[in-house]
Image: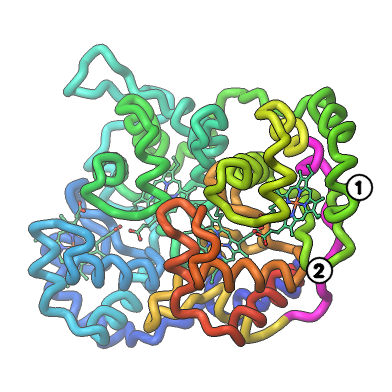
Amino acid sequence: MKKIFFSLLLGLGLVHGTAMAQGDAAAGKDKSMLCAGCHGATGKNPSPIYPDLAGQHAQYIVKQLKAFKSGERTDPVMAPMAANLSEQDMEDLAAYFASQSRTAAQSQDTATTATASAPVTVATKPTFVADAAAGKTLYENGDESRELGACIGCHGKEGHSEVLIYPNLFKQYPEYIEKQLRAFKDGSRIDVVMNKFAGVLTEEEIKNIGAYFANPEAMASIKAKHVAKASVSSEAVNAGKAKAGVCASCHGADGNSMVAMYPKLAGQSSEYLVKQLTEFKNGTRKDPVMAGMAAALSAQDIQDLASYFSAQKMTDGVKEVNELGKALYLGGDKKRGITACVACHGINGKGMAKAGFPAVANQHVDYLKGQLVKFKSLARANDNNAIMRSTTKKVTEQEMQALAEYMSSL
Ligand code: HEC
Ligand code: HEC
Ligand code: HEC
Ligand code: HEC
């Protein structure tokens, strides 16, 4: 099943390793003369001021060029460069740079002195020595206490991302990586997810992540520090189970409701469940039934119930894959500004607990569709930054049905 799914993704061109660019790489090569002075003829250049473009995902390159052109991403050098590019130019250039090898030996070694065994001494703050192992630890584990998602979840192992809308970081200049993290942190570069994550990084952590990427050959051998996984205490789970009796008539004793209008709660992340119950209680999310149920719950009850339901296993959803739903879920729709759902809810529909993105896999179709309708009509408005309200604005009712069926089949 997993294999079949992966090959479907390959077919759609959303997973690394596909050549599905609409751009013409040969035409892009001619046009790339303009870029070569800074980015290098093949997208590799010896200066850490300029990001390497070789082997970057075409989709990502196009998105950045559009962002420079529209001013959404500001850079005094790239703005005028992008201003003169047509959409076709962008596609062609992206196809060309994406087709170049990222892994081949390159000029980077001249630009960086950092190695894994000899940590970098940062000139601006001589007392601080960047720690590649600490960078790797953070990259692979995130930090639960600050709701910082693991970078590896989106950017992939050692920075080889498998989803084309997430940039590859492997072999990127550490100086450039650090500069972008600072830009996301201070808000001068905008991306909902990265603003949130970079926002909680300290300057030391940014440098540690840079140090982790400083020597691509050594990345695998750097030893990440051991991180104790915060496991849900069986005490909390048992306490939640004792309190879940009142929920059973609608949501099922183990959180697997039998009625399509009541959501399954089993296996949903406890972070998300806590947020929902708290918001039903304070009225941020409106539902007459759940408002009554949540009113009686203390913060401790909410925590316990969330621990209990998140520790249960969700039963399967629908079996058949809806093709229309699949295309939209994985690819979004650039023309209508619909962000691909996969960006946040994940390839497997498991969501991302730390980022507050709920699991949608195996959920009841009727419930899923109902929520999409509510986000679009603004009847549900508890999504931070109006993420779901803006995503559903241009989605038609028929597409919502298709998306719901697809998510349920994941
Ligand atoms: C005069 C130097 C210069 C030229 C010429 C130039 N760029 Fe850039 N480019 C930059 C700099 C500097 C940045 C980094 C901006 C930042 O720090 O946000 C950049 C960033 C980018 C990025 C974003 C990369 C990422 O990882 O997010 C893309 C894509 C890009 N350039 C494409 C191009 C293309 C295509 C051309 C040719 C049409 C071009 N550039 C020409 C200097 C240049
Ligand atoms: C939920 C997915 C997600 C997670 C988790 C995530 N990122 Fe990102 N990251 C993105 C997306 C999407 C972009 C591209 C934003 C854009 O289009 O401008 C990005 C861009 C970046 C860039 C800029 C790359 C370039 O070429 O300009 C860096 C650097 C980066 N992320 C580092 C990190 C680090 C370090 C972490 C962990 C602390 C992290 N990211 C966690 C999704 C994620
Ligand atoms: C009488 C039926 C009923 C009972 C009893 C009930 N719920 Fe609900 N619950 C619902 C309905 C209906 C919704 C969907 C509301 C909507 O459409 O926004 C819901 C939604 C939820 C959600 C949001 C799920 C998501 O995916 O966003 C959570 C969490 C939840 N209930 C937890 C509980 C807990 C915990 C209890 C017991 C303390 C409980 N519910 C008791 C009917 C019920
Ligand atoms: C940028 C991130 C992002 C994107 C893109 C996104 N979502 Fe969401 N989605 C969220 C967040 C965050 C929530 C939870 C909002 C809250 O806190 O109540 C959510 C909630 C949902 C829910 C409600 C789940 C439940 O249990 O009640 C559904 C269904 C959903 N999204 C489907 C989709 C679909 C379909 C798409 C693509 C058309 C999509 N999402 C795109 C972030 C995203």
Count neighbours of disc 2 (C-alpha within 10 A) and say few if under 14, some if 14 to 19, many if 20 or more.
some
Report whether the residue tagged 2 is closer than 8 Å to ligand 3. no
* Residue at 25% across, 54% down: 51
Residue 59, relative to residue 251: is it above or below?
below
Q: Is 315 covered by the magenta stretch?
A: yes
Ligand 4 location (quadrant):
bottom right
Q: Is residue 105 left or right of residue 30?
A: right
Quadrant assignment for the C terminus = bottom right
Residue 47, relative to residue 393: is it above or below?
above
The magenta stretch spans which residues? 308-321
The residue carrying mark 2 is 260
The residue carrying mark 1 is 253
Amino acid on which the number 2 mark rests in the picture? Ala
* Residue at 37% across, 67% down: 60
Residue sitting nearer the eye, 47 or 84:
84
Count neighbours of disc 1 (C-alpha within 10 A) and say few if under 14, some if 14 to 19, many if 20 or more.
some
Q: Is residue 308 left or right of residue 383?
A: right
Image location (x, y in percent) of residue 86: 19, 84
* Residue at 43% across, 59% down: 386
N-term-proximal mark, 1 vs 2: 1
Residue sitting nearer the eye, 288 or 114:
288
Residue sitting nearer the eye, 304 or 177:
304
Say if residue 97 shows up in the picture: yes
Dot label at residue 209: none
Amino acid on which the number 1 mark rests in the picture? Ala
> Mark 2: which secondary structure?
loop
Q: How many discs appear?
A: 2
Q: Is 264 covered by the magenta stretch?
A: no
Main SS category, magenta section: loop
Image location (x, y in percent) of residue 103: 42, 57
Image location (x, y in percent) of residue 294: 70, 42
Residue 231 image-quadrant placement = top right
